[in-house]
Image: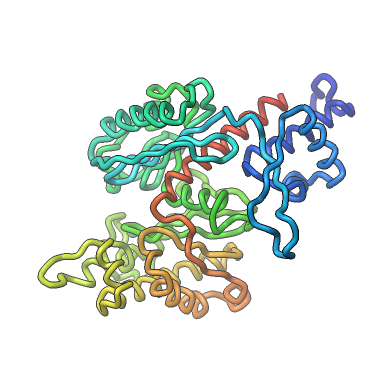
Amino acid sequence: MGVAKHGEGTLGWLRGRNRERVLGALRERGRISQADIARITGLSRTTVHTLVAELKDTGVLREVEAGVPDFRGGRPSVLLMLRESSLAVVGIDFGHSHVGVAVADIGHNVLAERRCDLDVSHDARAALDAAARMVDEVLGEARVERKSVIGAGIGIPGPLDRARGTAGSATILPGWIGVRIGSEMHDRLDMPVEIENDANLGALAELTWGAGRECSNFVYIKVATGIGAGLVIDGKLLRGATGTAGEIGHTTLDESGALCYCGNRGCLETVASGPAIIQLVGPLNGEVPTLASIVELAVAGELRSHRAIADAGHEIGIAIAGLCNLINPERVIVGGLLSRTGEILLQPMRESIRRHALLAVAETLDVRPAVFVERAELLGSLALALQTSTDRMSKAAEA
Ligand SMILES: [Zn+2]
């Protein structure tokens, strides 16, 4: 039997707990309808209605219009949001060659953001210093005081060793070996920080604001220089035992295939990653193209680029089919630079999934492009900060 806290189980205690669950849903979603609060919290509509009325009376909540009329063509539906929007979170995205920083209020409005080009991969400390300076700048621009910031989310472009708080692969971020990203950033910012890899952040951005809204089970796949997946199961990100869940790029497709930088042979990345596609396309007009230019050329109808990306889509589909057989998601959301090619990548991917997955799994699966490409990681780092900070606030309120 558990030890009951003072007042635990009484009506007043239960009411306080339910109120905190409603507030938790509002912090997590930013703007939300009463029906969705009931769905997320599992509370009855009557309970939600009573609590919302009380929170509106005391000025904690306010109503905002949804903007678009509902599908029945009626009046625009009314959404609720917290008034305490003076609280804010910070998001930091470290790419290989850029740093992005943004600040958002807990009503999910992005207040300011900026991005600067920097060689992040080879000089971790310079990148961490630059990020800390940019946090000062965006807070100033948004007129947000540092004491109002309840947490920061940080993204790095590669696997993460969650136990040590360091980058998990020296081959992806050579300058970050042994750097304790969390504590280094905490020292510079003086606020709670949370770290996550790029594919998981893309999944969080899509879950919170993009193609994964209202979807509890989906796979987000980032197809860019590398290939990684973020898995959302029952509305939560799956991180695995050490935080490397979703490394779909290192699924073996051909045991005797080319050697991968991870040390194995024939990984998906040896046939469908950025460097593999660049090598396959080869020089065009005497020049080795970048991945971005191959994407543009494919969209413009250049045959070699088009074919290389379509073939990558086919190979990625094989790995996704296996994954879908295991977790049976509703949706596969395709992000990253290559998703810019749209159906050139997606159509062969769908065909390949249909060919390699169980019929029951493939026929209900919806494969669609991500909403966010360029800002996926930065928005994901904000979503991570919002989620972890509000979880912390809810736990503190319950204690
Ligand atoms: Zn590999």
Residue 283 located left or right of residue 246: left
Residue 54 located left or right of residue 28: right
> Among all residues in the image, which is located at the extreme right?
11
Q: Which color scheme did the rendering employ for the protein?
A: rainbow
Give how far across and how far down residue 69 sits, in percent: 68, 58
Give how far across and how far down residue 398 sits, in percent: 72, 27
Q: Which residue is painted at 23% across and 41% down in the image?
A: 119
Q: Quadrant of the N terminus?
A: top right
- Vertical placement of 231 versus 252: above or below? above
Residue 7 located left or right of residue 147: right
> Among all residues in the image, which is located at the extreme left?
286
Give how far across and how far down residue 109 sits, in percent: 54, 40
Q: Closer to the camera, 233 or 193?
A: 193
Residue 216 located left or right of residue 123: right
Query: Which quadrant of the view contains residue 328?
Result: bottom right
Q: Which residue is painted at 27% across and 56% down in the image?
A: 261
Q: Closer to the camera, 378 or 309?
A: 378
> Among all residues in the image, which is located at the extreme front?
75
Give how far across and how far down residue 89 sits, in percent: 51, 32
Q: Closer to the camera, 390 or 260?
A: 390
Q: Which residue is painted at 42% across and 25% down in the image?
A: 186
Q: Which residue is painted at 52% across and 64% down in the image?
A: 332
- For ligand 1, the image quadrant comes to bottom left
Q: Quadrant of the C terminus?
A: top right
